Image: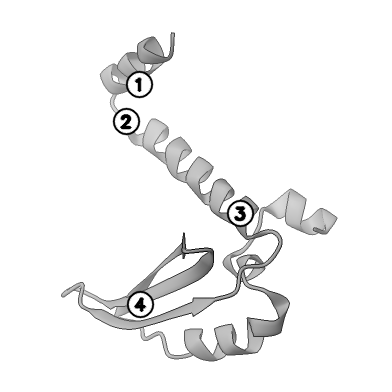
């Protein structure tokens, strides 16, 4: 992992094995403006599901071999999600979760 990756955080592309980056790029080129994606680890593979908005119907799905930094990428995403939850939670919710940790 480079210094830039550490400073800026890992990008989704960093979770994909280098031998599959062309396939990953081709897959993502199919994403339309009215779609969103969900990227996660499943059965030791990186899986990307593309859904149509607003119906939430699954449009495309593909698995990729994970890179050596895939777990770090997904850990980073989990941490960011938890930080966002804390930032948007009401003061009572934050207080309750802080008390639960004690």
CA gap, disc 2 to disc 4?
A: 28 Å
When the figure is inspected, residue 28 is found, relative to residue 65, above or below; the finding is below
Check contact, mark 2 vs mark 1: CB within 8 A.
yes
Which residue does the numbered mark 4 point to in the structure image?
A: 50
Between discs 2 and 1, the one toward the N terminus = 2
Which residue does the numbered mark 2 point to in the structure image?
A: 89
- Picture quarter containing residue 95? top left
The crowding category of the residue bearing disc 2, from other C-alpha atoms within 10 Å (few below 14, some 14 to 19, many at least 20), is: few
Q: Nearer the viewer, mark 2 or mark 4?
A: 4
Q: Nearer the viewer, mark 4 or mark 3?
A: 3
Pinpoint residue 32: horizontal percent, then vertical percent.
Answer: 36, 86
Which residue does the numbered mark 3 point to in the structure image?
A: 71
Question: Element type at marker 3?
Answer: helix
Q: Nearer the viewer, mark 2 or mark 3?
A: 3
Which residue does the numbered mark 1 point to in the structure image?
A: 94
Question: Element type at marker 4?
Answer: strand
């Amino acid at each position: 992992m480079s210094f830039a990756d550490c400073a800026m955080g890992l990008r989704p592309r960093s979770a994909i094995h280098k031998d599959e980056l062309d396939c990953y790029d081709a897959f993502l080129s199919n994403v339309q403006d009215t779609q969103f994606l969900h990227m996660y680890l499943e059965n030791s593979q990186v899986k990307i599901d593309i859904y149509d908005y607003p119906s939430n119907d699954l449009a495309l799905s593909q698995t990729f071999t994970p890179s050596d930094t895939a777990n770090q990428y997904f850990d980073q995403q989990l941490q960011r999600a938890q930080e966002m939850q804390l930032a948007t939670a009401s003061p009572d919710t934050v207080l309750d979760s802080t008390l639960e940790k004690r």
